[in-house]
Amino acid sequence: MDELWLVEDEAALSRVLARALGEAGFRVRHFSRAEEALEALSARVPGLLLTDIRLPGRDGLSLLVEARRRAPSLPVIVMSAYADLPETVRAFEAGAFEVLPKPFDLDRAVELARRALTSERGSAAPQPVGELREGLIGESAAMREVFRIIGRVAPTDLTVLLTGETGTGKELAARALHRHSRRAAGPFVALNAAAIPADLLESELFGHEAGAFTGARGRHLGRFEQAHGGTLFLDEIGDMPPPLQTRLLRVLAEGEFYRVGGRELIKVDVRLIAATHQDLDRLVAEGRFRADLLHRLAVVRIHLPPLRERLGDLPRLAGHLLARAARELRLEPKRFSAEALAALAAYHWPGNVRELDNLCRRLAVLAPGAVIEAADLALPRSERGQTASWEQDLAFWARRRLAEGVDGVYREARETLDRVLFEEALGRAGGCRSRAAKLLGLGRNTLGRKLGPRRLRR
């Protein structure tokens, strides 16, 4: 089997990964620095190069570019625990076979290596990377997966469906897909299907001729024509009326349409990106959304995770948004205290990143001093005590403790659960252990053992 080169400076990971690859039948040669691999590349080209993105000295992206310049057909897999969207896109644009976010399953790494070695790679030249303006930030596993898919899909013309709650950044993802595509020089046109009255939406999408309806005094070009040569982003696609769903399906299938009241067949070259916060599969089951249209839209699905599921990104994200607000509003920069960040992590964020952005703008103006304290946040009352289930309260508590880096969260949770249950049951039973144990469905001895030598009424 072809030789595989592994460039990784973390000794423990190198040993584990090299062993897994070796057991799978690969001949593995290890380097701890990019310079070492490039020196060896002068004499020999391996079958596959597997490199970390963060290395001492020359980094993995630089190694990727130089290795592909010397050996254009060499497949390269880039590993990273930190790659953001620009790094991920640069990796793919430089010719990476795949970006493998850390931590990863060893079986997946082995399978990717097999696929890379059996794939015929072209020698397409790297494309320049434009300035990053999307504002997508995150190092969590969920966001690095988003970056990976965007980097992989952006250069294609595949239709993409973005899903996720309101405020998670679906339009930012759509703009990232456009900016890193071959259509980047063309227009990016956005339309929110929920913001346009149903009787006007058809005209907004496809345009109309003069006299097509009352008030139509002249020709109007719709969003499809405006987006010719570029990207059309249809937000809240789940709110599109059924008749328009049928018309949109026809346009996607044939790439042509008539303006409202028109007889001229219009042909357009548009990449469509759709987004929704709704469950379209459920809408299909309920007969409110066309299954064939969903299949056309969801060639690739990208899910934007809610902020509460990636709280590890919150400190960096909040700092970025606060700094941006200060710049845009021409104010002195501020920063969050550790206590303020812990309070942010304990909040549920129903409005997701958009709500955090609005909060940072408010704090940039109203918070006194250069350091924002927890008391300055004035968040809406936490859902604690108002939630639909105790599991949500527990989730809020766990998120806060994990964000604070507390050790032994599981043990603390179990001890807290026992204490709360026992105190409530004893209170209900008037301090009687036998009655409290019966209320909880426990034996009296079990309750007594867990309570310890408390002086309570029998």
Image (cartoon, grey):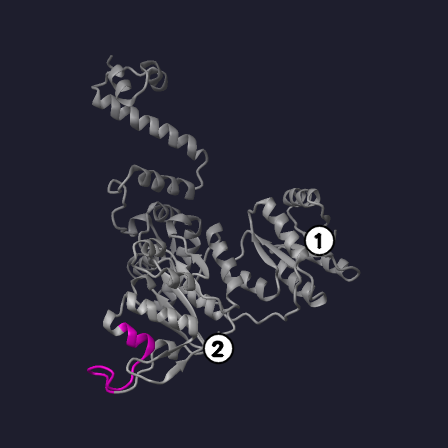
Q: Is residue 259 toward the left or the right of residue 408 in the image?
A: left
In this rendering, position of residue 332 left or right of residue 40 = left
- Image coordinates of residue 345 in percent, x first then y, are 37, 47
Which residue position holds label 1?
A: 5
Residue 317 position in % (x across, y down)? 42, 56
Residue to which mark 2 is pinned:
185
| Residue at figure coordinates x 39%, y 82% from the top left | 266
Predominant secondary structure, magenta span: loop
Instruction: Label 2: state its secondary structure.
Output: loop
Q: Which amino acid does label 2 sit on?
A: Ala
Return the x and y of residue 446 as percentages of the image width and height: 35, 17
Asked if residue 333 can be seen in this view, the reply is no
For disc 2, the neighbor class at 10 Å (few under 14, some 14 to 19, many from 20) is: few
Label 1: state its secondary structure: strand
| Residue visible at 63% across and 70% down in the picture | 124
Give the distance between the C-alpha atoms of the residues marked 1 and 2, in whole angstroms.
Answer: 38 Å
* Vertical position of residue 350 compared to residue 400: above or below: below
Give percent across and percent down for residue 443: 32, 16
Name, please, the residue furthest toward the right.
43
Q: Report the front residue among 126 and 203.
A: 203
Residue type pointed to by label 1: Trp
Image quadrant assignment for residue 286:
bottom left
The magenta-colored residue range is: 201-217
Cβ–Cβ below 8 Å for labels 1 and 2? no
Q: Is residue 9 magenta?
A: no
Quarter of the picture holding the C terminus: top left
Give the crowd class for mark 1: few <14, some 14-19, many >=20 residues within 10 Å. many
Establish if 231 lies above or below 18.
Answer: below
For the point 53% across and 62% down, which residue is it?
152
The residue at the point 59 percent across, 57 percent down is: 98
User: Which is nearer the N-term, disc 1 or disc 2?
Assistant: 1
